[in-house]
Image (tube, rainbow, N blue to C red):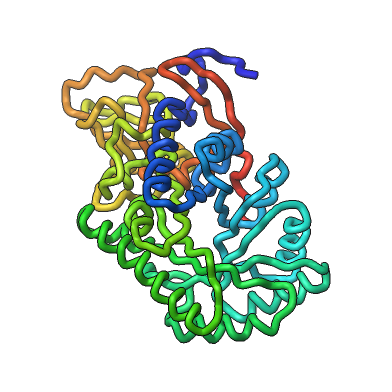
Amino acid sequence: MVSVTNIAELETPSLLIDVDRLDANIQRMAAIAKAAGVDLRPHAKTHKTPEIGRMQLAAGSPGLTVAKLGEAEMFADKGFDNLFIAYPLWGEQKWERLCRLADRITVRVAADSLEVVEGISRTAARHGIRIRVRLEVDSGAGRTGLQSPEQVLELARRMESLPGVDLVGLMGYGGHSSAAPDIDGVKQIGFQEGRHLVGIAEMLRAKGFAVPELTVGGTPSGPYAAQIKGVTEIRPGTYVFSDRTEVVMGWSNLDQCALTVQVTVVSRPTATRAIIDGGSKTFSSDAAVRSPGFGVVRGHPDFSIVKLNEEHGMMEVPAGTHLPIGTRLQVIPNHACVCMNLHDRVAAVRGDQVEAIWQVAGRGKVQ
C-alpha cells in the first residue's frame, strides 16, 4: 500500500520511476524486436523488480535474462517461468541450485568452458534432468566467451557425449560498444556482433549441430545486431530506464530517462557549491561515457555534480543561483543498473503523484 501520495512527501534520497517514460521505453524496444523478427528477452539485472518484469512480458517478451542464480530464484518465486542466466555458473552448490530451479521453470544457462559444462552435466544427470546451454563467444567485449570458432566447435563436440546438458544456441555480447566514438560506431559494432555469431552458427550447423538460438546485444548495440538475418534474440537491459550513459551513446535523450534520484540540498557552503544528500551509496561512483560528473540534474543543465563521498554529493552551481537549503532536485544517474542495486525500494510515479512503492526484490543477489 502506498503511504504517501506526492513525491514531496518522500524522504530523500529516494528513487523515482516515471511510469509513463518507463512504459514508453518498454514499448519502444518491443517494437524494434518485433520489426526485426527476433525475441526480446530483457536483462532484468537493470531493474531487479517483478512489477517491471511483468510489464516487459506483457509487451511480448517470452522471458527474462538475469546475471545470477539469486536473481533467477527470486523471479521464479514471483511467478516468472522462463529465464536465461547469462553467466558461467561454477561450483557444486550453484549447480545444485540450478537443477532445483530447472525442476520448477524453463531455464537456460551460458557457459564458455568444459569445466562448467561438465559440472552442470554431472549434477543434472544425478537429478535426472537436462539443462539447456548456450555457449558464449567473445564478440569483442574482451570479457567472458570462447575466443575462436574452433574453440566453440571443440566444446560443442565435447558436450555431445555428456549427459544432462543440451546445446541449444550461442550467446554474444557487444559490450565494447560503450567505447564507440558515436552512434555510427555503435551501429557497426552491433552489425559485427550479429554477423560474428551467425557465422559461428553456420560453421556449427555444417558440422551437424543445430544451435537454433542466437542471442546477442545490449541496449545500444542490440537493435542493430537484431537486423542480422539468423539472430533470434536480443537481451538489452538499460533501455527500460535509460540513463546518462545511454544518452551519450545515442540511444535516447534526457527526457526519455525514466529513473531519477530525488535529493535535497542540505548545505550551501559557498556561493557556487551546494551539497545534496546523495553520494556514492546513492548513485554509485560509476562514471558516464565521455562525460564528467556523476549525473544530470533534471531541468538544470548548468548544475554539475563534481564529486561524491559516501553520503555527500558536491554540486557546482553558477554564482548567484537561488538554491536554498531544502530545495529538492531530481538527478538522472550515470548508470541505472548499479543505482537500482543500492536501493531497497522505488516510487512508481506519474508527474508528482506516487502510484506505488515497488520493492527492488533482486538487489544484492550476487550469488
Quadrant where the image shows the C terminus: bottom right
Residue 159: name its quadrant. Answer: bottom right
> Can you see residue 312?
no
Residue 58 is situated, as x and y percent measured from the top left of the image, at: 55, 35
Q: How many numbered callouts?
A: 0
Q: Residue at x 61, y 57 (%)?
A: 68
Left or right side of 55 for 147: left
Residue 350: name its quadrant. Answer: top left
Which is more toward the observer, 157 or 358?
A: 157
Q: State whether residue 359 is above or below residue 160.
A: above
Which is more toward the observer, 162 or 50?
A: 162
Q: Residue at x 26, y 31 (%)?
A: 273
Which is more toward the observer, 131 or 68?
A: 131
Residue 271 is situated, as x and y percent measured from the top left of the image, at: 22, 26
Q: Residue at x 64, y 51 (%)?
A: 82
Which is more toward the observer, 23 or 96?
A: 23
Left or right side of 295 for 80: right
> Can you see residue 357?
yes
Q: State whether residue 354 is above or below residue 140.
A: above
Q: Residue at x 62, y 61 (%)?
A: 108
Residue 65 is situated, as x and y percent measured from the top left of the image, at: 55, 53
Q: State whether residue 245 is above or below residue 332.
A: below
Residue 229: name its quadrant. Answer: bottom left
Residue 121 is situated, as x and y percent measured from the top left of the image, at: 72, 75
Quadrant where the image shows the N terminus: top right
Name the outermost residue toward the left.
319
Name the outermost residue toward the top.
5
